[in-house]
Amino acid sequence: MKRNVDIKEISDGRLYCAGDMVKADTGGCAGCSACCRGMGTSIILDPYDMWRLQTEAGLSPEALLQAQAELNVVDGLILPNLKMQGPQEACVFLDPQGRCSIHKARPGVCRLFPLGRYYEGRDFRYFLQVQECTKEKRSKVKVKKWVDTPRLAEYEEYIRQWHYFLEDAQHILDTDGSDELRRQVNLFLLKLFFLQSWKPEDFYPQFEERLAQGKKYLGISCESL
């Protein structure tokens, strides 16, 4: 999701790599669940999130999209996001004690918070969102430990490929896309990446295969990613 803001206004002015220390550790949040409420449609899921929710939380794409997620337009493409519910607009996976019931399988957006990603030059780095987390006292932690994702280098390469694939798809639709083409592309990408089940084995080869199908369908050169 693109944000039309000046990064200097929402960050501490630094960009971080996986090996850097950043003041993001909330000490387990101590029961605070503010970042799990009132988030609207911003907890957007990507293919790795779908794979993780399926393999670690036992949620099929059909079940997830029927009960815990919904589809919305994000920068011209239709993507799934987690639902908020109730008077406090709480994440659908927040339990009565204010804890995440799928913590092991929580989406990448949740793992990052209060970090974000700054994309530039077909790459990205991390930044600290200084106005988002309500915890005033945070300690320093290494970015890769905070993100808490195995095989982080492979995951980061996947994030690059996914982000810029979506960006290229958006550019194609904005340049040449009729309403009918936009509908067809969105339906194809939804089926390819979100409605088909992922096998429980290694995610990355599966993603590479589907990404190749997506690029071929859109006429995107392999060298562009």
Image (tube, helix red, strand yellow):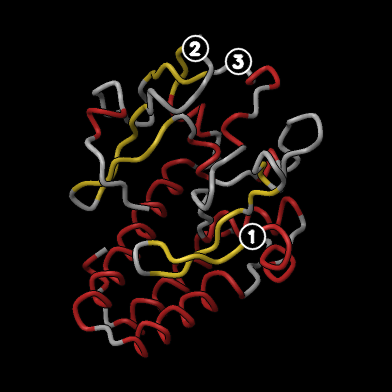
In this picture, residue 87 sits left or right of residue 156: right
- Measure the C-alpha gap from mark 2 to mark 3: 11 Å
Among numbered discs 2 and 3, the one appearing first in the sequence: 3
Judging by the rendered image, the residue that carries numbered circle 1 is: 69
Residue shown at 22%/28% (left/top)?
Answer: 8
- Location of residue 224 in the rendering, given as x and y in whole percent from the top left corner: 22, 67
Judging by the rendered image, the residue that carries numbered circle 2 is: 136
Residue type at mark 1? Ala
| Disc 1 element | strand
- Measure the C-alpha gap from mark 2 to mark 1: 31 Å
Check disc 3: other Cα within 10 Å, few if <14, some if 14-19, many if 20+.
few
Check disc 2: other Cα within 10 Å, few if <14, some if 14-19, many if 20+.
few
- Location of residue 169 in the rendering, given as x and y in whole percent from the top left corner: 31, 72
Judging by the rendered image, the residue that carries numbered circle 3 is: 27
Quarter of the image that includes the C terminus: bottom left
Residue shown at 55%/39% (left/top)?
Answer: 110
Q: Residue furthest bottom?
A: 180
Query: Is the residue under label 1 in contact with that under label 3 (CB below 8 Å)?
Result: no
Residue shown at 51%/75% (left/top)?
Answer: 190
| Disc 2 element | loop
Q: Is residue 85 above or below residue 134?
A: below
In this picture, residue 35 sits left or right of residue 200: left
